[in-house]
Image (cartoon, rainbow, N blue to C red):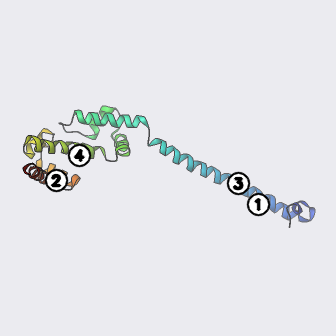
Amino acid sequence: MNFFGLFTTKNYFNRREFITNYFIAQIFILIFNSIFYKVHFYSNHTKKLKQIPGEVLLTEKAKKYIQKHIYKPITQHAVAEHLKITPEYLCRIFKKIHGDSLMKYVNKTKLEGIKNLMANENIHLYEAALIYGYKDPNYVSSLHKKLFGYNITEYRCKDREKSNK
């Protein structure tokens, strides 16, 4: 059967089937193209969202706020209130841009400061913890072990061994 044979009077039903199938195929192509466009647009759109300069600026302002208030207890709510955004939005963009949650960043920054104080100033854990706004040195020790994988007093012992050698 050739293509032009469909348009003869003998093949009326074939012609009707051809037209029906042709329109079904066109509708299928339109649906496929619209779905493909939406998927393509959405994937490009989400790639652009990862690089929004306003979000990077907000997280940098959050980091500056944390550095400025590092010796006080810091909450997500306080940082978000300072930036005039919701705590949920702040946590979402901070994790998206920096890979860690806001509070994990705060705790790591404070713990690094505590380790430096203990190593360089030769002060006790409870004193360093109080300077950085923690009331319980046991909490600081367990938090350090959770985030870094070893106890903070082990770090101090390792640091002393290095200085003795």
User: Is 84 on the left or on the right of 21, as rendered?
Assistant: left
- Are the residues flagged by discs 1 and 3 in contact, CB closer than 8 Å? no
Element carrying mark 1: helix
Q: Please give the label number shown on residue 108.
A: 4
Give, as a three-letter code, the residue at label 3. Answer: Ile
Q: Nearer the viewer, mark 3 or mark 4?
A: 4
**Crowding near pointer 4: few (<14 within 10 Å), some, many (20+)?**
some
Q: Earlier in the sequence, mark 1 or mark 3?
A: 1
Q: Provide the residue designation for mark 1.
A: 21
C-alpha separation, residue under disc 4 versus residue under disc 2: 13 Å
Q: Quadrant of residue 60?
A: top left
Residue at point 92%, 65% (across, down): 10
Give, as a three-letter code, the residue at label 2. Answer: Ser
Q: Nearer the viewer, mark 1 or mark 2?
A: 2
Element carrying mark 3: helix
C-alpha separation, residue under disc 3 versus residue under disc 2: 62 Å
Q: Please give the label number shown on residue 142.
A: 2
- Are the residues flagged by discs 1 and 4 in contact, CB closer than 8 Å? no
User: Is 68 on the left or on the right of 128, as rendered?
Assistant: right
User: Is 83 on the left or on the right of 157, as rendered?
Assistant: right
| Residue 9 point in image, percent of width and height | 92, 62
Give, as a three-letter code, the residue at label 4. Answer: Lys
Q: Nearer the viewer, mark 1 or mark 4?
A: 4
| Residue 83 point in image, percent of width and height | 33, 32
User: Is 1 on the left or on the right of 36, as rendered?
Assistant: right
Residue at point 81%, 62% (across, down): 17
| Residue 104 point in image, percent of width and height | 26, 47
Q: Provide the residue designation for mark 3.
A: 27
